[in-house]
Amino acid sequence: MTLTSPPLERLPKAGLLIGSDRVLSSSVGSIDHVYPGTGEVTGSVPLAGPAEIDQAVAAARSAFAEWRVVAPNVRRRAMLRLAALVREHAEELSELCIIENGTPRPFADSYPELVADLLEYNAGWTDKIGGEVVPTWPLRALDYTVEEPYGVVGILIPWNGPFGSAGMTMAPALAAGNCVVVKPPELAPWSVLRLGELALEAGFPPGVINVVPAGPVGGEALVRHRGVDYVHFTGSGVTARHILTAAAETLKPVGLELGGKSPRIIFPDADLQGAVVESIGNLAVLSGQGCIYGMRVLAHVDVYDQVVGMVQAFSGHIALGDPFAPTTQMGPVINTAARDRILGMVERAQAEGARLVAGGTPGEGDLARGSFVAPTVFADVAPGSELAREEVFGPVIAITPFSDEEEAVRLANDTDFGLAAYIWTNDLRRAHVVADRLEAGNVWINGFLGIPAGAPFGGHKQSGYGRLGGREGVREFTRTKNVYTPFDPLPSL
Ligand code: NAD
């Protein structure tokens, strides 16, 4: 198989974007970005350290002084112009998504439209964020609330879909009137750096959007910074614990979008083909490296063997390979460390008695140049085992049988996570009763067609708190002020 080398002429400047300046060297040095499709280095990326975070926060604070009084329709227009530029540069942005983490082209091609749509949807909120008049007693007064932006928002995003993640967080934060310091991950910095450049072109004043790729050192400096009023973090629970500890120093509010171990419950009356095709899609798209993917399949005993057989057969037809090829359905995982971690989980799952029915191997031949893992399927996964409870973040489906509704709900809820859940049945009552009992922030019944921009998205339990999307997503980035003035003269002495 031929693997395409990443077109390096596509890359934006690697430097940090602070205000309208590009900072090309940093106090903590640089990291070589590696394209996971072939293992080739694409460029050297300066990482923000505490000094650069200081500069970026100062730029955002200074911009906020003016940005906070800019009329909502002006903010709206800037967001709409950025959406238009994202569409205009769709092909280039899509290629950056491929280069930075090996997203297969068909899926990478969907990101610019997704982000443009998020910008447009949230632009619509800029002029609709109001407050309310509060009744008072026993004395009459005017009491009203105002939804204000926090000021400077620090945004930390993960490498699995940084462009989409930036759209989901930056769009509502900007709509609410904040300035942002966005930290793309060191492993996948390119698309968000380009988005920052396009934002300047769209007319956002310098400092409203700052983009500072960084690792844990810069990330922690951003969270600790006294000039940052609110932090939004998307990533793993392990890092979230560090974030909360760092934020505690200034008692800073934090929004968390974390991992998942999402169940896909298949009842015997379900559209089995639909349920299985969707599981396979989750396995292939981003190589299973998605927070909401329903790759813990719970299949009713009456259809269990059939489901296992279909998942096994379909997994063998996934087009695994060159992320730049338009027919590729599945690319590499993010790096060789992730590949080895996933293969370690495969080994432990076998030791715990799960039955390997497909994959479980690294990419062979040409694919060995990149960090590929074959589509992997386990049946007879024991409830309570590592594979049943822990996030793999790789292309591994785990199938477990259940015998009735009660058991399906118990197994589905038997993890510390609660991000998403998928129900497949044609029984309307059962679908909604089970949805009611599932511990998950988002439930899909009989099919997932993406996360609607207007829907609140987020987790229960250890999958995080706070919501992105819809009205709730914008509220996430505002705080309420109450203003009171009595109608009657104050009593005199
Ligand atoms: P991660 O937690 O390892 O890293 C996330 C970001 O935090 C990175 O940019 C990293 O540089 C930074 N970071 C690491 N240590 C830090 C520290 N001590 N202080 C501040 N910042 C620090 O997560 P990841 O590996 O990039 O992403 C995978 C995880 O993200 C998975 O658990 C996945 O489920 C989750 N995720 C959740 C969602 C969601 O919307 N719920 C979306 C995508 C990914």
Image (cartoon, rainbow, N blue to C red):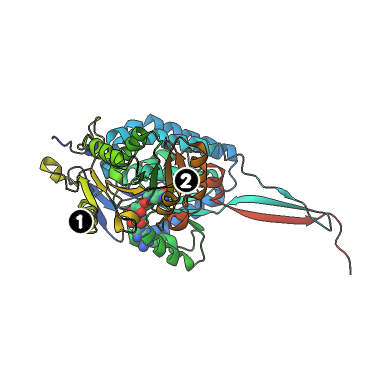
| Secondary structure type for disc 2 | strand
Q: CA distance from mark 2 to mark 1?
A: 31 Å
What residue is pinned by disc 2?
A: 442
Observer able to see residue 58: no
x and y percent of residue 8 in the render? 22, 39
Query: Foreground mark, 2 or 1?
Result: 1
- Which quarter of the figure is the N terminus placed in? top left
Q: What residue type is disc 1 on? A: Glu
Ligand 1 quadrant?
bottom left
Q: How many marks?
A: 2
x and y percent of residue 48 in the render? 34, 57
x and y percent of residue 378 in the render? 25, 48
Question: Residue 370 sits in which quadrant?
Answer: top left
Q: Nearer the viewer, residue 207 or 332?
A: 332
Q: Nearer the viewer, residue 340 or 252?
A: 340
Residue 240 vs 209, above or below: the answer is below
In the image, is the residue at mark 2 within 8 Å of ligand 1 by its beta carbon?
no
N-terminal of the pair, mark 2 or mark 1, is 1
Residue 250 vs 456, above or below: the answer is below
What residue is pinned by disc 1?
A: 347
Task: State if disc 1 and disc 2 touch (CB < 8 Å).
Answer: no
